[in-house]
Image (cartoon, rainbow, N blue to C red):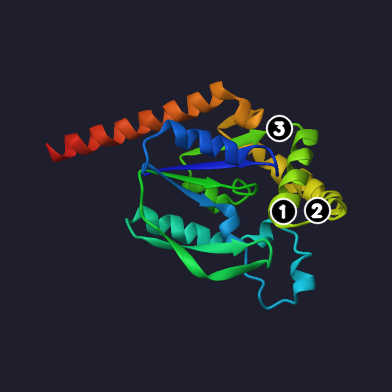
Amino acid sequence: MLIIGIAGGTGSGKTTVVRKILERLQPGEVVILPQDSYYRDSSHLPLEERLEINFDHPDSIEFELLVKHLKELKKGKTIDQPIYSYLTCTRASETIPIEPCHVIIVEGILVLTNPELRKMMDLKVFVDADADDRLIRVINRDIVERGRSVNKVMERYECTVKPMHVQFIEPSKRFADLIIPQGGNNHIAIDILTKYIISKQLTVIDEQSTANS
């Protein structure tokens, strides 16, 4: 099993990079574990407090569960991936069954900040983008997908997104094996990453064939 971590700032283009990798690989070869699914459940808090959660701080992620799930997948076990709603800031009672796969991509802004999680990764990727470009994407996404007003988005950016990026996310770039500037627009970097995945898959298949012969 090949485990790849893909990090980068909010709005840097991580999701686009992951999507373009999936387009280049055969269906069913890759499973995505989004960091966003592992935000801690806040259903015990009033809605007003939930809406003020700092989603860009490492403490907001239940890394213990994410690491546990990765270990179970490596053992060949199926996991129940949580479902998190940004609208209510709670976990749903339903889960998504995820079966083991040849390639696991762990994607999220903070996935390179956790030492135990980094140790499990065979390849660590950081998607880099200009701060202004990221802000534009954040505004568009939060208004359309998360129902926030422009003023609320800008307030959140200044109070949490920007300072947390400087404190936690940008420094995690030093742990990356591969940095992808320009996000999903960097076709050369995405091709290199895809070829790496395919070569690793072929190596595993060859090793399995040798062991069975």
Q: Residues within 10 Å of mark 3 (few under 14, many from 20)?
A: many
Image quadrant holding the N terminus, namely top left
Q: Position of residue 110 (x, y in %)?
A: 64, 49
Identified at 33% across, 56% down, the residue is: 75
Q: What residue occupies the far top of the structure in this picture?
A: 188
Tell me, for residue 129, which label it has, or none: 3
**Vertical placement of residue 12 versus 196, above or below:** below
Residue 48 vs residue 107, the one in the foreground = 48
Q: Residue beneath label 1, please?
A: 56
Instruction: Say which element carries label 2.
Output: helix
Q: Residue beneath label 2, please?
A: 160
The type of residue carrying mark 3 is: Ala
In the picture, measured across the screen, residue 199 lies left or right of residue 54, that is: left
**Vertical placement of residue 83 versus 196, above or below:** below
**Vertical placement of residue 153 versus 173, above or below:** below
**Quarter of the figure with residue 77:** bottom left
